[in-house]
Amino acid sequence: MFNPFSFYKIFANILRSNVSARETAIGVCVAMFLGFTPLNGPFALFLFIIFVIFRLSSISTLFTLPLFKLLYVAGLAHVADRIGSFLLIDAVSLKEFWRVFINLPIVAYLDINNTIVFGGIALSIALSPLVYFVSKKVNIAFRSRYQEKTKNIKLFQKLAAANLAPQAPASAGLSGFKKFTSRLNTRRFVPWFIGLVVFQLSFGLFISPFFSNFIVGKVNEYSRAKIDIGRANIWPLTLSFSLRDVKIFNPDNVGERLIYIKGASVRVSPLGFLAKRLVVSKVNLNEVQATLEGTSDGSFNIQKLTQAKQEQKPGLGQIFQGLLKKKDLFSRAYELLKKGSSKKAVEEAKLKRSEDQKTVQEVSDLARGKMVYFKKARDRYLFEIKSLDVNNASLYVKSEDGQAIEVEDTHIKIRNLALDPQSGAHFDALHLAGGLNKEGKRVGSLEFVFDKTFVKDVQKTEFNVNLKDVQLEAVRFIYADSLPVDLQQGVLNLHSLSTVMDEALDSRSSLSLKNHKFAAKGGANLMPEIAPMSLICGALNDIPTVVLKFDITGTVDKPEFSSFVKSLMDLVKPALKGAQEKVAGQGLGAIGTLFKQK
């Protein structure tokens, strides 16, 4: 019911309020910001939150807001739009600044990139000094003239007795941080805090599980993966969520499960979220089972999950295309290296990197004003994962003919993984370590590290491979097609560190091999000018433990193996010397020349 004394209560509060003239002037300036921008936008909500948290002169804001809004409707809205259009669209030199500023945390949510909103803010900032000064002077003059006259009026005395006119400011005599905290409106803030805690717990425990189907639908909509989630718990205030029983299926065959994850925890970056971007700071996956298998069309099954929905740009998925046909896994891995580090690929990567650094302006028309977006390539990714940790995983590696090996107790860490339905996937670093298991028997262990960076526009790629006590007969399908000889058995230890600067290759390796058995492969000869392959294989079989240290240089397109050849010949030379008289033709002359040099 309307109270006829409401106006007098407000008037009494203006005259006898404990709010200073400075704070009253600030309230008028806030009214101007509200009046010169749309009240149904996020910027207005931002100002409302400030009202909730801080003690401001809300009365002066409410009294002057209609005046500013009337001026806005009368014509200043058009002026604001023109100002915003000039600053956001026409001022090309400010494009990079706007990209950074508009994507700042919190600012990204305020629609600052709307020309009519930003124009209103700019106009308010320009007029604030004048409005503040005039409001402060008017407030002081108003109080000094009318406060004395009203204090003897009975109505105002009754209102004062009803504590409508508070006493001296609580912040009087305080300074610094204490003065700032005294302006916090704790009576409003505490209920909001309690309400948010209740919301966090109720949403995470009782409401979020019902959102599982919605989450799955959105993920399946924006990626080629077909995903099923048993349970999802979302904790909105801490920007985290947990998943249980995640199943990822082959998008081309939903009956084939590629990956199973028993438990996952995800934490979203607060700064990324406040900047209106989905950036995941940390992902932990536990008890993962995955199957890596070649398919007849020359691709990996898991590769299909990272392919772009529309093959317009080369993504991670396309790199795998054509690598499996009649090739073992080692050959495919080397083809990956060649495709990613060849001269052509490096030049394309540099050009793309240069283009990615440029800020692109995109403008879209609205009913009122225009939305202006400033983006770089990384801003176009659907989401990013800064760090992805996979623990206690089992990775099944299969060939087309059914041979398989399990990488058990696997730990995988991926850094800066970015995914986009149009561009595919990208990551900067990968670390994989685990034990090798063949039919329930331990057959060695491996560690693989991949790291790609740019040093002064030079692409630097590092590969670090460590194999320990690997039973070669168990993993022959991985390397059999790559070697010029048939290595039927043996126990291998290998340490290899390879660095590719642009396309220049520098690889340093050391290996030891025992219990081995080499055989010549039809039509292949490693060094025809030195000795027949059968003779070299026999010499290697006579050595109890083969130990080699060698370098590989050149480029990824044309590697130079001279160091490896020399190391190998130094190793087999004693055995070849005993068989020198058995070698005929060119091989005999070449060996004789070799020993004369010694």
Image (cartoon, grey):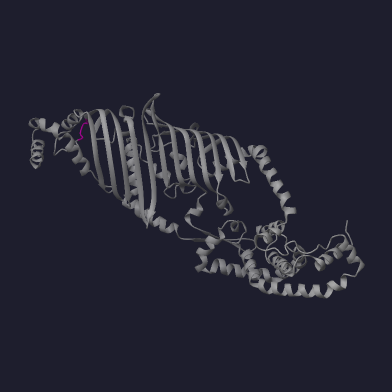
Tell me if residue 521 comes above or below residue 92 in the rendering.
above
Q: Name the image quarter holding residue 149.
A: bottom right
Is 509 placed left or right of 138 in the picture?
left
* 35 drawn magenta: no
- Residue 349 image point, x, y percent: 38, 53
The residue segment tinted magenta is 520-524
Q: Quadrant of the N terminus?
A: bottom right
Residue positioned most to the front: 173
- Residue 428 image point, x, y percent: 42, 48
Q: Quadrant of the C terminus?
A: top left
- Residue 192 image point, x, y percent: 71, 50
Q: Name the image quarter holding residue 514.
A: top left
Tell me if residue 566 comes above or below residue 349 in the rendering.
above
Residue ID at (32%, 49%): 500
Q: Is residue 484 visible?
A: no
Residue positioned most to the right: 154
Q: Name the image quarter holding residue 430.
A: top left
For the image, the number of numbered tags is 0
Q: Is residue 110 visible?
A: yes
Q: Provide the major secondary structure of the magenta segment.
A: loop
Q: Nearer the viewer, residue 11 or 438?
A: 11
- Residue 191 image point, x, y percent: 73, 49
Is 147 placed left or right of 271 in the picture?
right
Tell me if residue 326 comes above or below residue 45 in the rendering.
above
Q: Nearer the viewer, residue 485 or 257?
A: 485
Q: Nearer the viewer, residue 15 or 587?
A: 15
* 521 drawn magenta: yes
